[in-house]
Amino acid sequence: MSWNLRRQEVLDGEQLRAMLQDNPASAARAILVAAQQNMLDAQALLGQILLDGTGIEQDAALALTWFQIAARNGHAMASNMAGRCHEHGWGCEPDAAKAAEYYRQAAEAGLDWGFYNYGNLLATGRGVNKDQARALACYRKAAQLGHAKSMNLLGRYLEEGVCCEQDLAAAHDWYRRSAEGGDFRGQFSHAAVLADHHRIDEAVVWLRTALQNGNLNFLRVSRKTLLDATHPDIRALALDYHQQAANLGTRFCTKSIAAYNVGCRPA
């Protein structure tokens, strides 16, 4: 698929995303044209490709600018991404309070990621007053919208009875739904429940799935948990988690060095 800049029509968001798969550089030019013609999806997508350096020179500060433009025009995901930029310091100094405001806007627009990210700040008291009850409400709304990470966190609140009545059956059901939705922490939580019910073979399957999906920090923390497991089949997986963490750590360090050398943020 190609794009002729002399054409006056503006492609829709799905067409632009399809172009990114086929020809990132051509797609980036089309996205820029569409963004300049006030197409909201294109403005948000331009921010994303600038943040990632997909088909265009990476520029986190300019990415934030486009996220903010789209956010002002009512684009919920752009509000969420502006929040992420402010939370993590992508193209700006980290500012949890500004991140919270953008996440709140995304949540008020009904975006599952907005609820999740705003809930995280409320749960930890970053940029806002710590409020576990409001965090729980955010996770619950996101989970009900199908957000797998929030399902796992909702399960944790229900299991521990934090700001709610303890409900183990409901907690375990949310862990299962989170696992099936693809969240590696939910997969680990679900596996733990299965192991507690002596369904070891099923637990091992989910632990191996979490192993393949998990990030570096998760693998390191989970390895320590597995070492304390009573069942030998589960305890044996600690070595696999350790090896996967080592592999990811090597790739992360190589990528970070490369990013530093060209003046880019590590992914």
Image: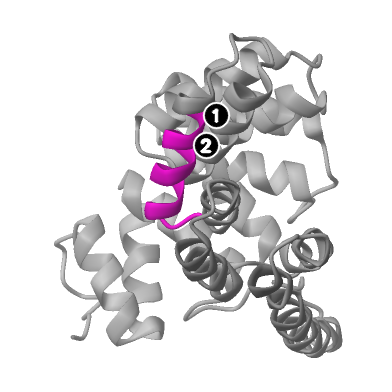
Mark 2 to mark 1 CA distance (whole Å): 6 Å
Q: Is residue 116 above or below residue 54?
A: above
| Residue 114 is a magenta residue | no
- Please give the name of the residue rendered at 79% of the width and 58% of the height, measured from the top-left corner: 225
The image shows a total of numbered marks equal to 2
Secondary element type, mark 1: helix
Q: Does the image show residue 230?
A: yes
Magenta range is 171-183
Q: Name the foreground residue: 99 vs 147.
A: 147
Q: Which mark is residue 150?
A: 2
- Residue 202: where, in percent of width, then height? 45, 63
Instruction: Identify residue type, mark 2.
Output: Ser
- Residue 224: where, in percent of width, then height? 84, 63
Task: Tell me the crowding category of disc 1: few under 14, some 14 to 19, or many 20 or more residues within 10 angstroms, Cα based.
Answer: many
Q: In the picture, which quadrant includes the N terminus?
A: bottom left
Instruction: Identify residue type, mark 1.
Output: Leu
Q: Name the foreground residue: 53 vs 108.
A: 108
Q: Is residue 14 above or below residue 37?
A: below
Task: Tell me the crowding category of disc 2: few under 14, some 14 to 19, or many 20 or more residues within 10 angstroms, Cα based.
Answer: many
Q: In the picture, which quadrant includes the C terminus?
A: bottom right
Residue occupied by mark 1: 154
Secondary element type, mark 2: helix
The quarter of the displayed image where residue 82 is located:
top right
- Please give the name of the residue rendered at 59% of the width and 35% of the height, measured from the top-left corner: 153
Judge left or right: residue 181 versus residue 87: left
Judge left or right: residue 138 versus residue 258: left
- Residue 27: where, in percent of width, then height? 33, 76
- Please give the name of the residue rendered at 69% of the width and 16% of the height, measured from the top-left corner: 162
